[in-house]
Image (cartoon, rainbow, N blue to C red):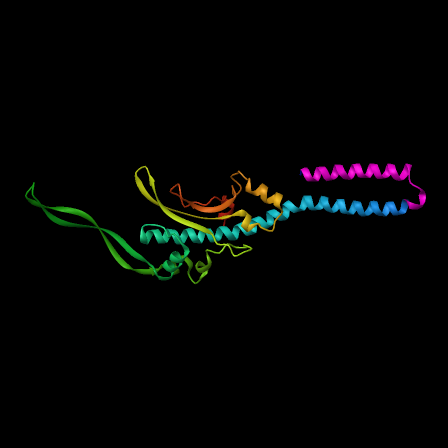
Amino acid sequence: MLNLILIVVLIFLVTIGLVFVIDRFLPQKIKPFLVLGFGLLSIFLGYKIYQSVNAPIEFNKVRQERFSKVIAKLKDIRDSQEAYKVVNGKYANDFNSLVQFIDTANFTITQQRDSSFMRFDKVYQIELQQDTVVIDTLGFIKIRDSLFRDSDRYKTMMNVPYAQNDEKFEMKADIIDKSGYKAAVFEAKVKKDIILYDQPEDLRTRENAHQSVEEVNGTEIKVGSLTDVSTNGNWPPIYDRKDN
């Protein structure tokens, strides 16, 4: 908006100056050339005004499209990591382990039911009924089929969409101490500048400075945390809608 105001003020000042110079100091025979030059200058300045207004609009379109694809990949990484933790009790520290796990591992399908049995009670010297829970194993299902059905997109979930140099998501896993409790954590992330590498620098700088509940805050898009027990992403709810 500041650039637009400056350009409008500049056009206004240039127009007044040219009109004054042409009318007061220049001979009649060169006025047509000056008018032509003034016309070309007006076209150029008009284009700059259009750019200053249109550039943020186009940037927002590009940003939302690219962020949607990146966040979809981060959701796949999160789903895969959560399945890995269910089976292994911790998160995978690298993508090779995670992909191999999805290719080979199974979920165990169980059924829980109440049951009871009789046990001799030494205090009362009689048999008393004891309640218990029985867990039956019903079968197994491949994690690949459970999470991705017929898709093999998990094999490339480490690749950052739109990255210029085939960059990968950064991913780490750890065990942290939370009030005496050992908790498994993970984090996967990518810098916004990698995704928006071809966009205007001033708009990327503004994007990296966002602090709003309606925006992806900070300089990165990420899921999980290495300091808190969380598998949330730092994106707003708009990116969780089905149409995204």
Residue 227, percent from left and from top = 40, 41
Residue 53, percent from left and from top = 68, 44
Q: Could you say which is closer to the camera, residue 99 or residue 27?
A: 27
Residue 40 visible from this viewpoint: yes
Is residue 37 highlighted in magenta? Answer: no
Is residue 25 highlighted in magenta? Answer: yes
| Residue sticking out furthest to the bottom | 150
Quarter of the rendering containing residue 12: top right
| Above or below for 123 versus 83 | above
Residue 96, percent from left and from top = 40, 58
Left or right: 210 as drawn, with respect to 124? right
| Residue name at image x 5 percent, y 43 percent | 125
Residue 238, percent from left and from top = 52, 46
- Marks counted in the figure total 0
| Above or below for 115 versus 214 | below
Quarter of the rendering containing residue 14: top right
The residue segment tinted magenta is: 2-30
For the N terminus, which image quadrant? top right
| Residue sticking out furthest to the right | 28
| Residue name at image x 49 percent, y 50 percent | 71
Residue 244 visible from this viewpoint: no
| Residue name at image x 76 percent, y 47 percent | 44
Give the dominant element type of the magenta stretch: helix, strand or loop: helix
